[in-house]
Amino acid sequence: MEGDDDMTAMAATPETMRAAVRERYGAPREIIEFKQVPKPELEDDQVLVRVRATSLNRSDYYTATAPIVLFRKLNGGSFRRPKTFALGGDFAGIVEAVGKDVADFEPGDEVFGARTGAFSEYVAARMIAKKPANVSFEEAATFGGSALTALQALRDKGKLQPGQSVLINGASGAIGPFAVQMAKALGAGKVTAVCSTRNVEQTRGLGADRVIDYTRDDWTKSGERYDLIVDVAATKPWRRIVRALKPDGTYVLVGSPITNPITGPLGKIGRLIVASRFTRRTFVFFIASFNKPDMEVLRELLASGKVKPVIERVYPFAQLVDALEYMGEGHARAKLVVTVE
Ligand SMILES: NC(=O)c1ccc[n+]([C@@H]2O[C@H](COP(=O)([O-])OP(=O)(O)OC[C@H]3O[C@@H](n4cnc5c(N)ncnc54)[C@H](OP(=O)(O)O)[C@@H]3O)[C@@H](O)[C@H]2O)c1
């Protein structure tokens, strides 16, 4: 569903599907429409999946609203018009057809994965893994972008070693609960999680060794120092972060509030790169990227129960905009799932 597609009203036929689409940027309620659009064409290495559930990531909200002007161009669109009408990323569903080069999936397989356009009845995707039989479609749909981001932040960028001490700033929401559980699953010695009062019990239940309520205590002033800080909330300046990092510790920046509508976090990242050069501590910013081996890692973590899906709310497809608006408020406790029936 690229920007040149015909988005005029279509009748429902076997070749069409219902999808949440948009033709411009803006608040979800103003721009998102449910329409009949052509089903995606299947490429030889893709699998056509009938979507049963999709889960929201913050990027879904940003894709609709495009709050950072520069990123509109970097994402391939123009300043006024997005490149693609399609919305959504994470999904779980049932394979309906496979491309001629696909050997490891067949129609009827239950899968989960990620592909732009997941807010629709069908997606044609490559980044998929088999859904473990012991989890629901709603649960499996949560193991997409947020889970992958937590994994790559801890394992690849943070280079977490068994026994190390880790702090997760922003331990609730879409990414935080995965980060807390994955830190434990990867063998961290002590996991300290930072969240607000209402999420303290949830976070403790996920296995955090210590939970700091940021509305009462400041983790940069506790005197404790960590091998690795994974920061999903980015609420502290470098001079304070340094106090909480061991001399050879690593700070992985995952996300940041948007303070500059033109360049987004680029200025902040630039300042952190420069500031970190004056210490032995390592600063890393990264953008998570899907790959097949990591889809398998997610499948194993899901199947083994070492990392459990944490779902705050499940919405029917017709209430997708409500879910996106709630995500946009920035205080979701855990994953928001939308069923696509
Ligand atoms: N680098 C990447 O590849 C990548 C990938 C995905 C997302 N991201 C970014 O990561 C960020 C978080 O994404 P998300 O999907 O997890 O967002 P989210 O679901 O909106 O969660 C944000 C969390 O931050 C917490 N928070 C807010 N203020 C805080 C503070 N002062 N101290 C500690 N925690 C605070 C909130 O908890 P309370 O409600 O308790 O305040 C909320 O749970 C976003 O900026 C997103 O763009 C980056």
Image: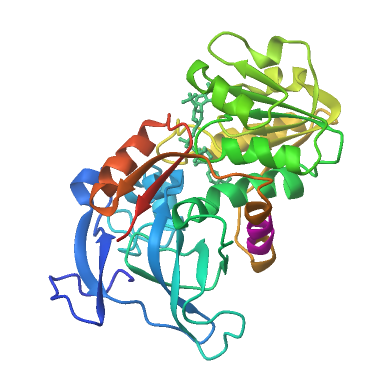
Residue 308 in the image: above or below residue 281: below
Q: Quadrant of the C terminus?
A: bottom left
Q: Quadrant of the N terminus?
A: bottom left
Q: Vertical placement of 287 versus 204: above or below?
A: below
Considering only vertical position in the picture, is 99 above or below 5? below
Q: Position of residue 149 (x, y in %)?
A: 61, 48
Q: How is the image coloured?
A: rainbow
288 in magenta: no
- Residue found at x 85% / y 31%: 280
Left or right: residue 151 compared with residue 244: left
Q: Quadrant of residue 283?
A: top right
Q: How many marks?
A: 0
Residue closer to the observer: 43 or 16? 16
Hey, which quadrant is residue 177 in on the image? top right
| Rendered location of residue 112, percent (x, y) | 51, 63
Q: Is most of the magenta stretch helix, strand or loop?
A: helix
The magenta segment is 295-300
- Please provide percent x and percent y for residue 107: 47, 81
Q: Position of residue 167 (x, y in %)?
A: 71, 28
Q: Farthest residue toward the bottom? A: 100
Q: Quadrant of residue 270?
A: top right
Residue 26 in view in this figure = no
- Identify which residue is drawn at 52% across, 23% down: 199
Identify the residue shown where x is 76% and y is 17%. 243
Asked whether, in this view, residue 174 is left or right of residue 118, the answer is right
Question: Is residue 36 at all visible to an observer of this figure?
Answer: yes
